Amino acid sequence: MATKKMIFIIVIGTVFCVTTCQSKQTKSKEVTESSIEMDTTTIKVNIPAIVINTITSDSLELTGLIRKMLKWNETDGYYDFGVVRSSPEDSVYSEINWEMHNRRMQQLKETDFFTMDFLENYQNIAVHLDKELKENLERYYVGDLPPYGNGANEWCNCQDFPTNWENNLMIVDLKINANSASFNWTWYKEYYNFVQAQKVDNSWRISYIELFDIKNFTW
């Protein structure tokens, strides 16, 4: 009897063990499959802009781009948004000089410094100024400074280029997010100009310059 009882206990123990182990394996398999499913799920997150405080290939390229843009402007001697009178006797400008403006637009394209967004914004400023001049909300008299802007050159926010500016030029507060960048450039203390750029065909191009904002051309 003792032997039969012992055999019965062993059989029951074996069945319990097999059932328990299979249950654990099933749970383990479920957890593993669930983990795999979660791991293969694409999670989209907003990546914040990275502030660059060290010299990188991007910061060097952007510094070089601003230097070339300013050098071009310093030497090109061309006037942005030229205006004309309806007749030589008029003392007030009446509209944009579109022939002059179209030549300027072609120059900007040929520099290869700017994105299409920048060029479209530049064109929109000309259209806006033309409307303002024709409506004569505030007159732009011949010989006077324009009734818009701050009287400075929009490209550099300056009256004149300082001595040795090329060597003193630097960019600060550089932020890069994927193919977009924003930063300030300066050539002396407490003087900053905000710029945005986009990477086009693996090269940085200027997409926004602070003083070429249409709100600066409204009076």
Image (cartoon, rainbow, N blue to C red):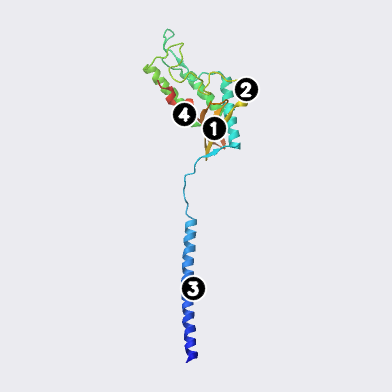
For the residues labelled 1 and 2, the Cα–Cα distance comes to: 24 Å
**Nearer-N-terminus badge (1/2):** 2
**Vertical order, 103 against 22 (above or below):** above
The circle drawn on residue 120 is 4
For the residues labelled 1 and 3, the Cα–Cα distance comes to: 64 Å
214 relative to 156 in the view: left or right: left
Disc nearest the viewer among 2 and 4: 2
The circle drawn on residue 129 is none
Amino acid type at circle 1 is Arg
Identify the residue position indicated by label 3 in the image: 21
Contact flag, marks 4 and 1 (Cβ < 8 Å): no
Contact flag, marks 4 and 3 (Cβ < 8 Å): no
Identify the residue position indicated by label 1 in the image: 205
138 relative to 99 in the view: left or right: left
Using a 10 Å C-alpha cutoff, classify the residue at mark 2 as few (fewer than 14 neighbours), some (14 to 19) or many (20 or more).
Answer: few
What residue occupies the far top of the structure in this picture? Answer: 89
Judging from the image, what secondary structure is the residue with disc 1 in? strand
- Please give the name of the residue rendered at 62% of the width and 22% of the height, measured from the top-left corner: 164
